[in-house]
Image (cartoon, rainbow, N blue to C red):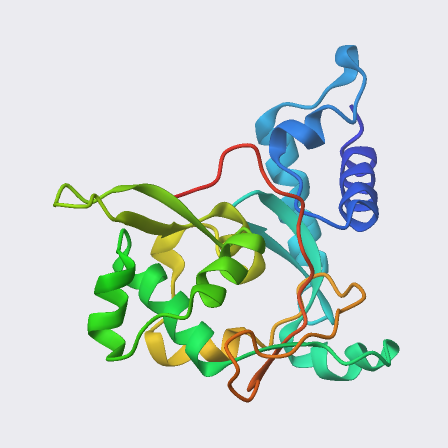
């Protein structure tokens, strides 16, 4: 198999897909009798990443695979392609998401204990609707409250390969400004009645079969 051909097919697929592609999905692009090895595909991905060094588009590995995305520093200008107001999330929602991400698995009462205020049910509902948060179990105490954890979609949205890539807490809010795939944003208000604070320009990624805890 010609290495340049493999590289070109992989790059074209990443550009066309509009979502992360795994190594297994990339392998399926090729005829069975001419399918590159996993090492060959990783070599092609490394070449693509090197080719995009210093450019406005980068290759990024996230939880669901690999994707081509606009670098964060160009997201604000490129977002002007869409006149619609981008989604915005309130401080309360982002604080709740941060607590789940960094202290998972965690119950709602534990979130409330840290924040000092009740968790609006609409916040958890919104996080679940975006498939950023899921129920991962139940605490073995009276009432068996639900334990909340993050999903693979959460990792993909924030450009993380796994939970070990989580940045310091102070940087989490800034990550909401990232626009990894640049699709049409949807205008919504803060879900908990507070003034929306941070724009979230990234799209809804297709839900993976097996979310990551």
- Residue appearing at x 42%, y 78% in the figure: 92
Residue toward you, 87 or 56: 87
- Residue appearing at x 78%, y 27% in the figure: 29
Residue 172 can be seen, yes or no:
no
Above or below, 39 against 202 in this view is: above
- Residue appearing at x 30%, y 47% in the figure: 146
**At which x and y percent is residue 7?**
76, 40
- Residue appearing at x 38%, y 69% in the figure: 96
Residue toward you, 52 or 201: 201
The part of the image, by quadrant, that contains residue 30 is top right
The part of the image, by quadrant, that contains residue 10 is top right
Horizontal relation, residue 54 to residue 123: left or right: right
**At which x and y percent is residue 43?**
62, 39
The part of the image, by quadrant, that contains residue 183 is bottom right
Above or below, 176 against 21 in this view is: below
Horizontal relation, residue 205 to residue 123: left or right: right
Residue toward you, 108 or 78: 108
Q: Residue furthest front?
A: 143
**At which x and y percent is residue 100?**
34, 61
Q: Residue furthest top?
A: 33
Identify the image quadrant of the N terminus: top right
Identify the image quadrant of the C terminus: top left
Above or below, 2 against 4 in this view is: above
**At which x and y percent is residue 133?**
45, 53
Above or below, 55 against 157 in this view is: below
Residue 189 can be seen, yes or no:
yes
């Amino acid at each position: 198999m010609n290495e340049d051909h493999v590289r070109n097919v992989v790059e074209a697929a990443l550009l066309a897909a509009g979502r992360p592609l795994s190594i297994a999905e990339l392998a399926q692009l090729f005829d069975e009798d001419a399918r590159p090895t996993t090492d060959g595909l990783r070599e092609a991905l490394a070449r693509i990443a090197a080719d995009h060094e210093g450019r406005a588009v980068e290759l990024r590995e996230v939880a669901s695979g690999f994707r081509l995305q606009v670098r964060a520093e160009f997201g604000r200008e490129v977002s002007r392609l869409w006149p619609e107001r981008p989604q915005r999330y309130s401080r309360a929602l982002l604080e709740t998401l941060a607590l789940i991400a960094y202290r998972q698995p965690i119950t709602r009462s534990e979130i409330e204990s840290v924040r000092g205020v009740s968790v609006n049910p609409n916040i958890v509902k919104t996080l679940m609707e975006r498939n950023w948060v899921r129920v991962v179990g139940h605490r073995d105490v009276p009432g068996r409250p639900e334990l909340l954890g993050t999903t693979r979609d959460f990792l993909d949205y924030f450009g993380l390969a796994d939970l070990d890539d989580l940045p310091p807490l102070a940087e989490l809010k800034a990550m909401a400004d990232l626009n990894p795939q640049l699709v049409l944003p949807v205008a919504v208000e803060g879900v908990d009645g507070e003034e929306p604070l941070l724009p979230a320009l990234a799209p809804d990624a297709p839900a993976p079969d097996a979310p990551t805890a």
